[in-house]
Amino acid sequence: MTAGFEPPKHVAIIMDGNGRWAHARHLPRSAGHRKGVERIHPTALACASRGVEYLTLYAFSTENWRRPGGEVAALLGLLSTMIDDEARTCLRDNLRLRLVGTLEHLGQGLQDKVWAAVELNERNTGLMLCLAFDYGSRDELVRAARSLAQEGVSPSDVDERQVSARLFTSGMPDVDLLIRCGGERRLSNFLMWQSAYAELYFTEVLWPDFGEEQVNAALEAYAARSRRFGGLSQGGTH
């Protein structure tokens, strides 16, 4: 790693490629999703060990509801299993859990399970692992606009701070590094406000194969860049 390297505070990952990983192995798509879930905690630990403070993973988008019913049901079943596992392993490894998005379309039992996992780990002090579930950036901004209107905030008082305070990520720093697996090169409605000045890193590696090596490669690429905020440079080696 570059000498004097300051790690990104907030890393976000679009976990793409589960279906293609399964197809290449002649397995059902659900097998790819299960393998993808297995990569969550090791990736969080790899980021934490390198000084990252926040890791946001795109677990389920607002558009994912349009997938075939069987696949959606399988994903929700994985959420139930995964949240149980993460509740225990995050407690063990001093990671915090946070929801970015909404649970309003889930049954009460699963909602309660998610909030219990968040509460169990709220006193931890390490990396905050944020699961973006039923999340879409446009939906988030619409909700923020509605909140401002319902609270009677004067149009002249609306600024970036007011909007940011009403996003799901309120209180979190903006994204420094956004990683997309699977070879695609688009944001797919993910953290668009928060990623306004993020460094973008695209890899051909499918999410089920993502791990410590890929985390290191992304951080090396981040360290080599000169970040510019409206023309001002910050960090990097060039």
Image (cartoon, grey):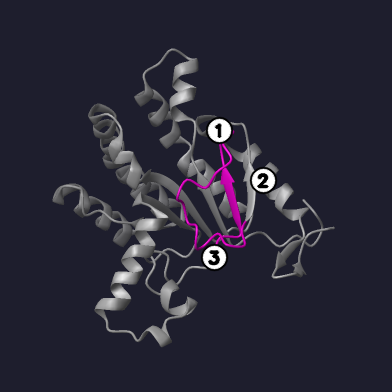
Reply above or below: 229 against 61.
Answer: below
Residue at 48% across, 37% down: 39
Q: Which residue is mark 1?
A: 182
Q: Residues within 10 Å of mark 3 (few under 14, many from 20)?
A: many
Q: Which residue is mark 2?
A: 218
- Tell me the amino acid under the disc marked 2: Ala
Instruction: First in sequence, mark 3 or 2: give its number.
Output: 3
Residue ranking furthest to the left: 108
Q: Which residues are magenta?
A: 174-198
Residue ranking furthest to the right: 238
Which quadrant: the C terminus?
bottom right
The percent position of residue 20, horizontal first and vertical second, equals 48, 24
Q: Residue 92 in magenta?
A: no
Instruction: First in sequence, mark 3 or 1: give its number.
Output: 3
Q: Which residue is mark 3?
A: 174
- Tell me the amino acid under the disc marked 3: Asp
